[in-house]
Image (spheres, grey):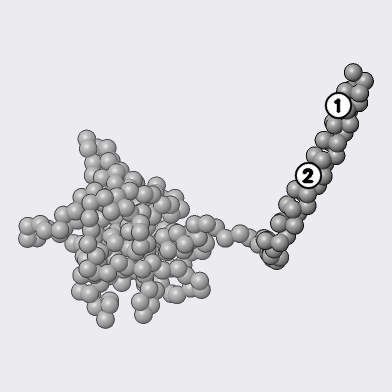
């Protein structure tokens, strides 16, 4: 029995030695394979210091939608307008915002106030043009093409001085398109974006292109209450007719 026990101990010892040798061979093969078939590239990553004034993620919307919108103040009250540039700097607004005034105050996005001269008023289309002296860093909006086609569900933004406050955006869709009307009546579009007193004369933008496609001019009422999500705009084709009839585009 002792001999068998010793043999068992020797066998276990030998087996342990063999296992350690086998493990060493496997590890050695694995170590060699790791470097024989793979070479890690050295990457140099340059990390730039963060800007003290990070860019606003909506800066494009500010510059194309918000900054060109102005607050118009006169003895008649407060309304909105949008800066459009041609040979000079002009502001497009609604005729009922300026009414019979010849001079109005224009407040820009940076809170500076300049004087504007009313040069064209068309009460039929409810549009008006105000001329201002070009100032430094003024932002102007881009008009959509005259051939622009409106469709129901087209997403839009409106920007205006709701309740006489600073310009603010609202979002909606084109909800009504009436282009072909009986003689003597102008076509109009309606939008679902909330329009409040003070928004009159403010721009309506195509939300995809940021181009002006209309000017907000009225809202519907029901039993004496404003229905702010049923608002009418002067379409872009009528804006072009207005500008061309007064040779503003010449």
Residue 56 position, x and y percent, is: 55, 58
Residue 124 position, x and y percent, is: 18, 62
Badge 2 density bin: few <14, some 14–19, many ≥20, Cα 10 Å: few
Q: Is residue 89 above or below residue 194?
A: below
Mark 1 and mark 2 in contact (Cβ < 8 Å)?
no
Quadrant for the N terminus in the image? top right
Q: Camera-side residue: 174 or 83? A: 174
Q: Which mark is residue 8?
A: 1
What residue sits 22% from the left and 68% below the top? 147
Q: Which corner quadrant of the image does residue 11 belong to? A: top right
> Can residue 203 be seen in this snapshot?
no
Q: Camera-side residue: 6 or 151? A: 6
Q: From the viewer's perspective, is 237 left or right of 185?
A: right
Quadrant for the C terminus in the image? bottom left
Of the two numbered discs 2 and 1 in the rendering, the one whose residue sits closer to the viewer:
1
Q: From the viewer's perspective, is 128 left or right of 27?
A: left
Q: Which corner quadrant of the image does residue 6 belong to? A: top right
Q: From the viewer's perspective, is 66 left or right of 121?
A: right
What residue sits 21% from the left and 65% below the top? 238
Dot 1: element: helix
Question: What residue is pinned by disc 2?
Answer: 22
> Can residue 127 be seen in this snapshot?
yes
Dot 2: element: helix
Q: Which corner quadrant of the image does residue 94 belong to? A: bottom left
Residue 199 position, x and y percent, is: 35, 52
Q: Camera-side residue: 191 or 226? A: 191
Residue 53 position, x and y percent, is: 63, 60
Which residue in the rendered view is the most extreme toward the left? 183
What residue sits 47% from the left and 62% below the top? 60
């Amino acid at each position: 029995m002792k001999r068998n026990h010793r043999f068992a101990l020797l066998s276990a010892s030998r087996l342990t030695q063999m296992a350690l040798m086998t493990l060493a061979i496997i590890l050695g093969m694995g170590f060699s394979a790791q470097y024989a078939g793979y070479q890690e590239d050295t990457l140099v990553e340059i990390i730039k210091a963060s800007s003290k004034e990070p860019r606003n993620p909506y800066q494009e919307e500010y510059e194309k939608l918000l900054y060109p919108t102005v607050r118009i103040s006169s003895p008649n009250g407060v309304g909105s307008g949008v800066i459009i540039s041609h040979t000079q700097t002009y502001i497009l607004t609604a005729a009922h915002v300026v009414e019979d005034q010849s001079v109005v105050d224009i407040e820009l996005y940076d809170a500076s106030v300049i004087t504007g001269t009313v040069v064209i008023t068309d009460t039929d289309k409810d549009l008006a043009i105000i001329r201002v002296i070009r100032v430094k860093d003024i932002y102007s909006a881009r008009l959509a093409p005259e051939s622009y086609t409106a469709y129901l569900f087209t997403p839009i933004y409106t920007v205006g001085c709701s309740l006489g406050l600073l310009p603010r955006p609202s979002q909606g869709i084109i909800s009504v398109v009436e282009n072909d009307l009986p003689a003597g009546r102008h076509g109009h579009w309606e939008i679902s974006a909330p329009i409040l007193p003070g928004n009159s004369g403010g721009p309506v933008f195509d939300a995809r292109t940021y181009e002006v496609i209309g000017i907000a001019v009225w809202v519907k009422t029901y039993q004496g209450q404003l229905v702010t999500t049923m608002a009418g705009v002067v379409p872009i084709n009528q804006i072009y007719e207005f500008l061309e009839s007064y040779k503003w585009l010449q």
